[in-house]
Amino acid sequence: MAPKKLSCLRSLLLPLSLTLLLPQADTRSFVVDRGHDRFLLDGAPFRYVSGSLHYFRVPRVLWGDRLLKMRWSGLNAIQFYVPWNYHEPQPGVYNFNGSRDLIAFLNEAALANLLVILRPGPYICAEWEMGGLPSWLLRKPEIHLRTSDPDFLAAVDSWFKVLLPKIHPWLYHNGGNIISIQVENEYGSYRACDFSYMRHLAGLFRALLGEKILLFTTDGPEGLKCGSLQGLYTTVDFGPADNMTKIFTLLRKYEPHGPLVNSEYYTGWLDYWGQNHSTRSVSAVTKGLENMLKLGASVNMYMFHGGTNFGYWNGADKKGRFLPITTSYDYDAPISEAGDPTPKLFALRDVISKFQEVPLGPLPPPSPKMMLGPVTLHLVGHLLAFLDLLCPRGPIHSILPMTFEAVKQDHGFMLYRTYMTHTIFEPTPFWVPNNGVHDRAYVMVDGVFQGVLERNMRDKLFLTGKLGSKLDILVENMGRLSFGSNSSDFKGLLKPPILGQTILTQWMMFPLKIDNLVKWWFPLQLPKWPYPQAPYGPTFYSKTFPILGSVGDTFLYLPGWTKGQVWINGFNLGRYWTKQGPQQTLYVPRFLLFPRGALNKITLLELEDVPLQPQVQFLDKPILNSTSTLHRTHINSLSADTLSASEPMELSGH
Ligand SMILES: CCCC/N=C1\SC[C@@H]2[C@H](O)[C@H](O)[C@@H](O)CN12
């Protein structure tokens, strides 16, 4: 699809002043005017006020809504990454369909009269799984990511030779809306400091995109030395608490002339499971923006709309220990995870309006919200009961345990099985040496749950068993490091476990295709599994339920559950970790739900312990800031009607 002129309907929807009367492609240009420290758009002085949103964290049906709200906020551009692993799930297999339709997203941005600052990587960080790099790269265990390693560059070249020709027609001077393109991402923060690699990327971008498009780099102030490159425009990133004057002064050492650019001005921050919810104050964020705009800087606010890490797509950091990112990527951004405007949005719009025209007319209202429940789930069965269905190809056998990457299991879960070679009468230490659990292991003996081993924890379990007892270890990939690592983040059992004095060998690996099974289950009402009582450990629960009225956005609340994965009508909503927090609810976009009495289905894979009453609630507000201790307090504060609602209640679609 080539870039279209604004459709007549949309151009009517937008005030005429906002409809860029797009000149013909041959007179279009976006350049740096070093003589006046500014950008020029079609020869006229131009400053962008941009916001980041990630199409890969927002279902496609909601793209237009989010983009219009960003335009209404006064932005004239958006910035987004292209995650390589989202589009090339297996080597040579490409997916640009549905919520992966990058060109459709570019078109939606054009319809919203927004220019685009594109960041195709190949590494993107973004708290996204492996920073956007595909995990199949690690099938060559010795590969040196983000360097001029020939294996890595071969894969990068192959990917960009597919991607970059797709976006070529969308470059601004070709009639599209892409005004600039970033090469790599904060490369100066990566230990390699491989200039050959950066030069290779710059050459590839030039070869495939031509000489006109503005190419740039982004680094924190400490990364400018290794992250900047001759011929690429240097920009920085920093937040409201940082010293703007000091950082821009440092930037001038790399770009003595041309516009000052903050490519990531942090409006909020990310959340880790088990840490407090991050926020940035409205006053600090707006003050920093105003100061930068007064300087004439171009600014991109990171994030303007965060969205959600659906499925297994969250990344992780390493700050002393492994820290997985939460499912919510709300980021305390101006537009909330559910797409609602926040006070921060209105405050930022007021600032922007002091410097450039902002669209008139009302902002779309917040989306309709819905409460439902409690919904009581029934036990479907223990995960092991479905092993044949979850691993239809059967196990892979190996003397030593193999990693996820070695068996080509990219995300989710793998079961490791061996048998006890002798009877153990006394509780005997069981552990995985060298921090070899990546990332959480749920241990069972003959199907009976024994407990959890975690990455970065020195825990040991104490096991007994008979000769021939099955020792099962379900390993969960909690998301590959997206930042903070100078090495590859392999998943699974990286070392053979030890029981007492015995190194355990003769392993079977069962890569589990849980999503396929849940999608198959989704339309079926499975019989209650003939378990006398709820077993502990990895267990499926489910329930079909009608929504009698209209549907609305809602927030799944799982009080008393521990940790697991959720599917709604076969869609993988993401991870929950009620016990850890700070996130206690999962955003459920209304389009996932069937209205007017049609049956909906929720499926949980609970990995540890279930509440006495296996119930869940659908709330009309999110809970993102409640750690386990605070959580109980929060429960008490929830309104009585919220918690005591009978099942199923007619929905108040308000
Ligand atoms: C001190 C920060 C270093 C890591 N950089 C971060 S943490 C949040 C953001 C996103 O990950 C973004 O993708 C990075 O480019 C910059 N940044």
Image (cartoon, rainbow, N blue to C red):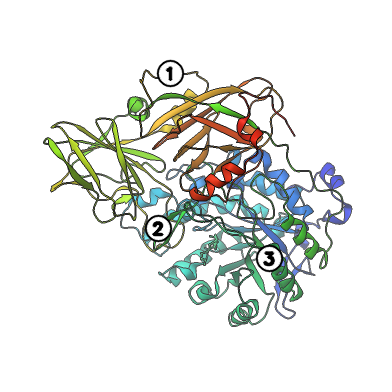
User: Horizontal placement of 429 versus 332: left or right?
Assistant: left
Q: Nearer the viewer, residue 527 or 299?
A: 527
Pointer 1 with pointer 2, Cβ within 8 A? no
Residue 285: which disc?
3
Q: Earlier in the sequence, mark 1 or mark 3?
A: 3
Q: Nearer the viewer, residue 571 or 651?
A: 651
Give how far across and how far down residue 433 sits, in percent: 23, 53
Location of residue 562 by image quarter: top left
Q: Secondary structure at mark 1?
A: loop
Q: Residue furthest left?
A: 422
Q: Secondary structure at mark 2?
A: helix
Question: Mark 2 highlights which residue?
Answer: 152
Q: Nearer the viewer, residue 240 or 486?
A: 240
Give how far across and how far down residue 551 sits, in percent: 69, 30
- Badge 1 amino acid: Lys
- Badge 3 amino acid: Val
